[in-house]
Amino acid sequence: MTAEEKRNTALKIGSVELESPFLLAPLAGITDAPMRRIARQMGAALTYSEMVSGKGLMYGDKNTERLLAIYDDEKPVAYQIFGCEPKVMEYTARTLAARENALLDINMGCPVPKIVKNGEGSALMKNPDLVYDVVCAAVRGAERGAREIGAAPKPVTIKTRIGFTADTLNAVEIAKAAEAAGAAAVAVHGRTREQYYSGKADWQEIAKVKSALRVPVIGNGDVFTGEDAMAIINETGCDFVMIARGALGNPWIFRDALALYRGEEKPSAPSANERIKMLMHHFDDLQAFKGEYAAVREMRKQVGWYLKGIRGSADVRRRVNSITDASAMQIAFAELLGRV
């Protein structure tokens, strides 16, 4: 089905109906509430939290509660959880039933060594039977938790890759196991774990998953422009598009993709002035959410993304690495704004 044909169909993941097919991907250490809020304002239909550890939730990790915070004006939000033990995932899904997230996504694609070493993330692709058990457990937990509070169960989905290595491309097998276990949708990143984020995403492997499933498929990988978002829909037939690195410093990608999806003219690229003002807005929101100390340090990476290619911004990008207080960072941004 092409993007034009999809415009005339309801966009749903389980019971959750969405405004468009464009979603902000979960990115560890990045997709916190302030970033998700901006993405929603710019047109993302659904955003995902940073990865939440099932064991962290079970054992009361102090950082988990911050990861679960959701602004009212950023909904709908999906929590992404990770773990490889069915009993832990059942507990996690049951415990999160009363939260404000719209759905629950299980990470089966993270390539980071410390995650993989624990049998979590993309390591689950090595064991389709365990994938089935983990999804079954999460669905069971979501249903049990919903009954306890008198609510409808939240859809459970997974995010995976096309394989662990180039010699073990098994995304279709993994996706079918998840679907059989009750997953409401499957997101596929068109790279192997072995690739991490290098090389080119293989959209044809995503297309194979789409052809094999009845539930919606979410395509992910190498979507850096609105045109890319349309292309992955048209080339794979995927129902939704998950945008990750393409949204870093560029929340306008959702606005652009949405315009093209609707058959409208793509808006003009944001000016340097608009980009700097969005950066300043992001920083203010981050301070309100996490406090000055964390906001200043976490904003350093955002500065590089937002200011990339802006003439005269190199000095500011260097300076922020040694700035330790909010006022100095705000002054640096204001000075740059005055020069562009």
Image (tube, rainbow, N blue to C red):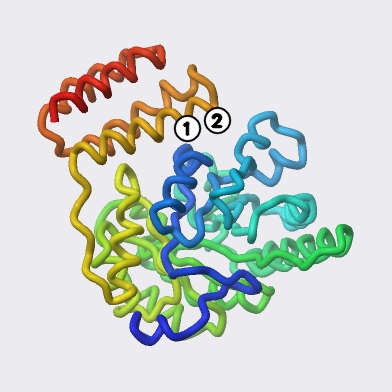
Name the quadrant containing residue 195. Answer: bottom left
Q: Quadrant of the N terminus?
A: bottom left
Residue 233 makes an appearance in the image = yes
Determine the residue positioned at 61% across, 69% down: 16
Helix, strand or loop at label 2? It is helix
Q: Is residue 191 left or right of residue 9?
A: left
Q: Which mark is residue 289?
A: 2
Decide: few, some or many residues near mark 1? Use Cα within 10 Å; few <14, some 14-19, many ≥20: some
Helix, strand or loop at label 1? It is helix
Name the quadrant containing residue 240. Answer: bottom left
Q: Position of residue 237 (x, y in %)?
A: 38, 81
Determine the residue positioned at 57% across, 59% down: 124
Q: Amino acid at mark 2?
A: Phe
Image: 249 above or below 104: above
Residue 168 makes an appearance in the image = no
Along the line of sight, the residue nearer the viewer: 222 or 17: 17
Q: Quadrant of the C terminus?
A: top left
Along the line of sight, the residue nearer the viewer: 87 or 148: 148
| Residue pointed to by mark 1 | 285
Callout 1 touching callout 2 (CB < 8 Å)? yes
Q: Is residue 128 left or right of residue 145?
A: left
Q: Position of residue 83 (x, y in %)?
A: 64, 50
Q: Position of residue 197 (x, y in %)?
A: 33, 51
